[in-house]
Each structure stands twice: as C-alpha cells, then as structure tokens.
Image (cartoon, rainbow, N blue to C red):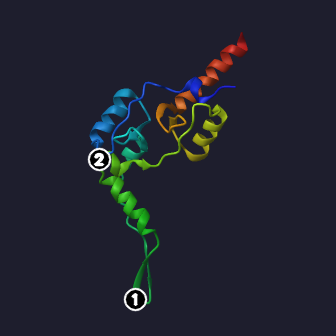
Amino acid sequence: MLTVKDIMSTNIVSVKPNTEITEATRLLLEKRFNGLPVVDENNKVVGIICQSDLIAQQKSLPIPTLFSFLDGFIPLKSTKKLEKEIQKIAAITVADAMVKNPVTVRPDSRIETVAALMVDNNFHTLPVLDDDDKLVGIVGKEDVLKTLISDHSSAAE
C-alpha cells in the first residue's frame, strides 16, 4: 500500500505571506510547480498559493447583477464573494491571494485518500505535515500520476 511518504517531494520551496506576487509567480514558473505552501515566521503552514490563484489576477472584475425592489437594489451576488474576488485581482502579496488554512495530509495518508481529495476538490497540491504540524513535504497531481507508471511497469514484470 503506497502512502504519501512514498511519493511526496521533500525538497520544499515555500513562500511567506509578505512575498510579492511577482516573486511567487516567478518561483512557480521557474520550478514548474502548481502550488507553493505559505509558511509563517515559525514555519507553520498558513496557506497555499497556486497557479489558479495568480491567474485570477487576469480576470476582469465581475459586476454583480442587481435586482430592483421597492425602489432599492438588491445584489444577486454575495458581497463577501465579490470582496474576495477583488482582493485576489488586486493582490500585491501572497497573503492577499493565497488560500488560507489549506487542506493538508500526513505522510502516512494513503494515495487513494490523496487522489480523492484532489479529484473531489480540484486540488493540485497538498502540503504534507508531520504529527507536530511541521511541513515535511508536498504532494502534487504529478506525484500521484507517477504511481500509475510504476504500478503499470511492475505489473508488466
């Protein structure tokens, strides 16, 4: 039975919340990563910044549809969601664009669990934390895909 420990990357590249968006983008492109864990001054994971979070900056601002009722306007879109989208589009630092309190996995998590999390929630990258909540690795979709090749090649032998 394969676990996260068997496939995770331990060569971790992380960023701080105050890292500029341009630096995070450069790291993602240079290292060919889908996402980077965001750690605080104590090296605790506080978020994750993914390519999709940065691509959101290229979106145009969605204008909510308004509904007129008794001479008043009622937005048909949540103002909280609109504020969140504005924050991502205007982000200057990682803290403005990251997903806070990301889903994490443990080194002993089964690959099936990771695959289900990734597929069901459209996650590309998951930080791996030990029992002390210390960042010990990262697992991405590519790591999971590699297990298909190794399973296939060992079945052919």
Q: Nearer the viewer, residue 132 or 28?
A: 132
Q: Residues within 10 Å of mark 1 (few under 14, many from 20)?
A: few
Work out which residue is located at the far top of the displayed protein and give it.
Answer: 157
Work out which residue is located at the far front of the displayed protein and give it.
Answer: 132
Q: Amino acid at mark 1?
A: Asp
Q: Residue at x 40, y 63 (%)?
A: 82
Q: Which residue does the numbered mark 2 point to in the structure image?
A: 93
Q: Position of residue 144 (x, y in %)?
A: 58, 29
Marking on residue 13: none
Q: Position of residue 65 (x, y in %)?
A: 43, 71
- Alpha carbon distance from label 2 to label 1: 40 Å
Q: Secondary structure at mark 2?
A: loop
Q: Residue at x 47, y 72 (%)?
A: 76
Check the image and report above or below for 21 versus 154: below
The quarter of the displayed image where residue 109 is located:
top right
Identify the image quadrant of the N terminus: top right
Q: Residue at x 39, y 47 (%)?
A: 98
Q: Residues within 10 Å of mark 2 (few under 14, many from 20)?
A: some
Q: Which residue does the numbered mark 1 point to in the structure image?
A: 71
Identify the image quadrant of the C terminus: top right
Work out which residue is located at the far bottom of the displayed protein and give it.
Answer: 70
Check the image and report above or below for 102 versus 80: above
Check the image and report above or below for 16 versus 30: below
Query: Does residue 105 appear left or right of residue 31 in this picture?
Result: right
Mark 2 or mark 1, which has the lower sequence index?
1
